[in-house]
Amino acid sequence: MMRVPLTSIDRTHCLPRAVRATPAVVWWLVRVPVYVLLRIAQPIVRFALAALGLLSFLLALFYHFTSTLVHPPFLPLLGFSLLCGVVLVLYETLLRLFS
């Protein structure tokens, strides 16, 4: 039997496979530690953002209906409450992205 020598085309066939696998390996090396940290901090972050959002909303209502101040901080507190909700949604989106 006659052996066919390897040509340069056959040797470079493995190169694209390695090049295609490199970004996947790098993404996995970045994704797993970030996901673990986000997942560990999730209960604390969720509780803190929900508590701050609820507290600022209740304070906004309290200042709006019972305050004798000329300009009670209703809108800033309401905005902070909404911002806490938006940050919580972004945090959950990051968890889904890295999972």
Image: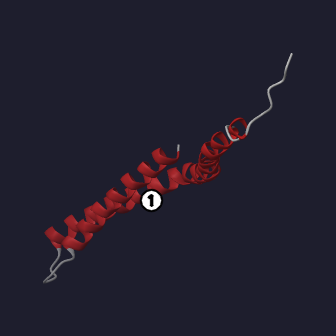
Where does the image place residue 37, in percent across and percent down from the top left? 60, 54
Q: Closer to the camera, 69 or 17?
A: 17
Q: Closer to the camera, 94 or 50?
A: 94
Vertical relation: 56 (above or below) 39: below
Q: Who's the residue at 26% across and 70% down the image? A: 77
Q: Who's the residue at 41% across and 49% down the image? A: 93
In the rendered picture of this protein, how many numbered marks are placed on residues?
1
- How are the residues colored? secondary structure
Where does the image place residue 56, in percent across and percent down from the top left? 30, 65
Query: In this image, 29 relative to 53: left or right?
Result: right
> Local crowd at mark 1 within 10 Å, few (<14), some, or many (≥20)?
some
Task: Say which residue label 1 marks.
Answer: 48
Where does the image place residue 63, in percent across and percent down from the top left? 20, 71
Q: Amino acid at mark 1?
A: Ala
Furthest-right residue in this view: 1
Furthest-front residue in this view: 2
Where does the image place residue 32, in percent across and percent down from the top left? 62, 48
Q: Who's the residue at 44% across and 59% down the image? A: 48
Query: In this image, 79 relative to 22: left or right?
Result: left
Q: Closer to the camera, 90 or 8?
A: 8
Q: Who's the residue at 43% across and 54% down the image? A: 91
Vertical relation: 48 (above or below) 13: below
Furthest-top residue in this view: 1
Vertical relation: 86 (above or below) 59: above
Quarter of the figure that contains the N terminus: top right
Secondary element at image label 1: helix
